[in-house]
């Protein structure tokens, strides 16, 4: 029998199987577990950026409405247990071990029967459904891993609302080389009878989604900017307020603790989805105000002033740089960055580079880190002071030193892969990763 630490070793060993899309293995694994996914209704959230924020908002709204929802997200920041939550609380060490001790022999029997090895994400997805069913969860908020149509989470049958946050060019080797192709894959989470909510702005994607909704027999399609939207009102250092409009419905002065104007758009998506699911205004208001989602424009320290944001692709970097221009103009900006090799790194650096005075490049703790040093090359046209420090704690210490040396008008920005920014956050706050 595996204990918790041995369970983590087992899960991490599965990462060597990488991506292997298709639903056959996931369906078979869940069948042998008793099809726990059939016992709950799901809110399914896909898209390029903002998925985690929308999932966390919906989860908080459901809790405010008196429910005990399941929430499945990835990756985690400090503990693997963060990926599986019920009522906002992460799964226990004991439950992780118990569930994997049940799943592991099933995986081995599948392989003996001729199935391919399930991937880490497929095992994670099965863990989530099994755990939620064991805890009596009636509503699960599920974040898509990659893509949509052939993502492991798409075994869901009881989808109440499918949310597509936006579409940008990412994982083009897997999902397609145009936004339209990627949107077609991501819109595969649309199911017969479900409501569909989308934050996609391009008219070509509106047309694609309209066709997909009709083909799948979905209930309706709500498009941000056409059917609903959020309008920024004001902000303080710790929250922003906005007005939500949806037909004749107007919710004014909604409070949101997540910073950045893009979060208003994410919140509008979550509010629309929550309304379609039947939640009342009070639960929506309370849930938004209670939402917690670290490493998204998070102010983590004052000495030196430090902001952490997991901008892991060029779309996320565009949002981050807009925020920097709006709020930190004139600051000396020291950047600590580490990005995975499969991301659009050069495009992202082209956005951030012109705002950067000094940069420390580090290696994300991931097999997909690849030639992380190339980021230094991408910064050379923009920045004179470039440092390489492979170990993240050492990179944090160097970046803090450079920021303090730059004086009171300096800002330390930690950005890139969530794997990296989480480790940097842990180093700053004294949180040990499990």
Image: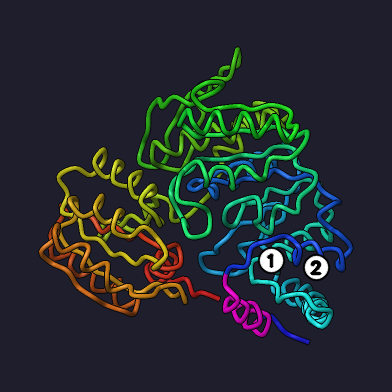
Q: Is residue 327 left or right of residue 61?
A: left
Label 1 secondary element: helix
Identify the magenta region. 5-18
Q: Residues within 10 Å of mark 2 (few under 14, many from 20)?
A: many
- In this rendered view, identify the residue nearer to me: 368 or 179: 179
- Residue at 56% of width from left, 27% of height from top? 223
Residue 237 occupies which quadrant of the picture? top left
Magenta span includes 6: yes
Q: Which colour style is shown?
A: rainbow
Q: State whether the magenta stretch is mostly helix, strand or loop.
A: helix
- Reading the chain from its start, which is encountered first: label 2 or label 1? 2
Q: Is residue 45 left or right of residue 403?
A: right
SS class of the residue under badge 2?
helix
**Neighbour class for label 1 at 10 Å: few (<14), some, many (≥20)?**
many
Q: Is residue 16 magenta?
A: yes
Say which quarter of the image contains residue 408. Answer: bottom left
Residue 255, position as x, y percentages in the image: 49, 33
* Distance (Cα) linking label 2 and label 1: 9 Å
Judging by the rendered image, the residue that carries numbered circle 1 is 122
Q: Given contact means CB atoms under 8 Å apart, are the residues at marks 2 and 1 in contact?
A: yes
Tell me residue 378's x, y (percent). 22, 63
Residue in view at x 46 percent, y 34 percent: 264
In which quadrant of the rendered image does the N terminus lie?
bottom right
Q: Position of residue 66 (x, y in %)?
A: 75, 40
- The residue beneath circle 2 is 29
């Amino acid at each position: 029998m595996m204990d918790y630490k041995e369970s983590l070793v087992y899960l991490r060993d599965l990462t060597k199987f990488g991506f292997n899309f298709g639903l056959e293995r996931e369906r078979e694994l869940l069948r042998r577990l008793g099809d726990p996914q059939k016992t709950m209704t799901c809110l399914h959230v896909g898209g390029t950026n903002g998925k985690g924020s929308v999932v966390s908002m919906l989860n908080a709204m459901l809790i405010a409405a008196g429910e005990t929802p399941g929430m499945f997200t990835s990756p985690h920041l400090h503990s693997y247990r963060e990926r599986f939550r019920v009522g906002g609380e992460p799964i226990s060490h004991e439950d992780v071990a118990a569930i994997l001790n049940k799943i592991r022999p099933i995986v081995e029997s599948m392989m003996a029967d001729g199935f391919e090895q399930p991937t880490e994400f497929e095992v994670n997805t099965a863990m989530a459904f099994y755990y939620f069913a064991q805890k009596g969860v009636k509503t699960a908020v599920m974040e898509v891993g990659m893509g949509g149509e052939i993502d492991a989470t798409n075994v869901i049958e009881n989808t109440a609302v499918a949310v597509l946050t936006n579409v940008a060019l990412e994982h083009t080797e897997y999902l397609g080389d145009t936004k339209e192709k990627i949107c077609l894959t991501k819109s595969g989470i649309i199911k017969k009878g479900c409501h569909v909510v989308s934050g996609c702005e391009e008219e070509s994607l509106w047309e694609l989604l309209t066709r997909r909704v009709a083909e799948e027999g979905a209930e309706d399609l709500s498009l941000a900017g056409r059917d609903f939207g959020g309008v920024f009102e004001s902000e303080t250092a710790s929250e922003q307020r906005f007005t939500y409009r949806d037909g004749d419905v107007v919710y004014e002065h909604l409070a949101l603790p997540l910073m950045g104007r893009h979060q208003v758009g994410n919140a509008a998506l979550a509010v629309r989805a929550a309304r379609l699911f039947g939640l009342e205004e009070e639960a929506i208001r309370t849930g938004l105000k209670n939402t917690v989602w670290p490493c998204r424009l998070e102010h983590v320290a004052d000495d030196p002033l430090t902001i952490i944001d997991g901008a892991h692709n060029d779309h996320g970097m565009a949002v981050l740089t807009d925020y920097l221009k709006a709020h930190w103009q004139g600051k000396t900006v020291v950047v600590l960055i580490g990005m995975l090799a499969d991301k659009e790194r050069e495009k992202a650096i082209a956005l951030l580079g012109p705002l950067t005075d000094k940069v420390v490049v580090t290696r994300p703790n991931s097999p997909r880190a690849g030639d992380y040093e190339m980021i230094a090359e991408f910064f050379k046209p923009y920045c004179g002071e470039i440092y390489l420090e492979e170990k993240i704690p050492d990179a944090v210490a160097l970046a803090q030193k450079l920021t303090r040396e730059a004086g009171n008008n300096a800002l330390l920005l930690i950005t890139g892969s969530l794997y990296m920014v989480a480790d940097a956050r842990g180093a700053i706050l004294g949180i040990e990763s499990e």
